Amino acid sequence: MELTSRLLLDTHALLWTLLDPDRIPARTLDRIRAADTDVLVSAASAWEIGTKYRLGKLGEAHALVYGYGDHLRRLRATELPISSRHALAAGMLTWEHRDPFDRVIAAQCMIESLPLVTTDRALAAFPGVQVVW
C-alpha cells in the first residue's frame, strides 16, 4: 500500500508554485508536484488573493483570480473549505497575530493535522503548526 502525503499550501506558497516556482525550494516543489501528494489549498487563500487583488497588491494575479478553479485543477489541488469548526478555532486561538487568513490556515493545520508549506515566520513559530519548506 502506497502512503499518501498531504500538504496545505499557504497563500504565498500557492502563488509562487503557480506564478514563480523558482522561489520554492526544489525538494519542496518536487513534493508538491509528486503524484502521491494530496495538495490542499484553504478557501482562506482564495479570500486573501481576492482581497489583495482588489486592493491592487496582486496585479500580476489577474489570470489566477479569474481562472482560480482551473489553476487548482492543473495543480491537482483540492480546496479545503472553512468549516465552522475551523472558524471557531481560528477566532479562539490565543495568538497575537491578527491576520484573519493566517489564523484560519493555522486552525485548519491543527484541526486537520496538515503540514503547512510556508516561509511565514509567524505561522512557523505557532505551536501546533508543522512547517514544510
Image (spheres, grey):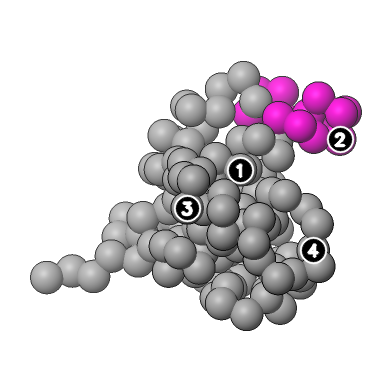
Q: Which residue is mark 3?
A: 85
Report the disc number at residue 44: 1
Q: Which residue is mark 4?
A: 97
Q: How far across and down, in percent of the image, does residue 52 sit?
A: 80, 34
Q: How far across and down, in percent of the image, does residue 10 sit?
A: 62, 55
Local packing at callout 1 (Cα closer than 10 Å; few below 14, some 14-19, many 20+) is many
Looking at the picture, tell me which residue is in the foreground, 95 or 128: 95
Report the disc number at residue 57: 2
Report the disc number at residue 65: none
Local packing at callout 2 (Cα closer than 10 Å; few below 14, some 14-19, many 20+) is few
- Looking at the image, the residue that sits furthest to the top is 66
Quote the CA–CA distance across marks 4 and 2.
21 Å
Q: Is residue 53 magenta?
A: yes
Do residues under tags 4 and 3 come within 8 Å of each other at their CB atoms?
Answer: no
Quarter of the image with the C terminus is bottom right
Quote the CA–CA distance across marks 2 and 1.
17 Å
Range drawn in magenta: 50-64
Q: How far across and down, in percent of the image, does residue 44 sit?
A: 61, 43
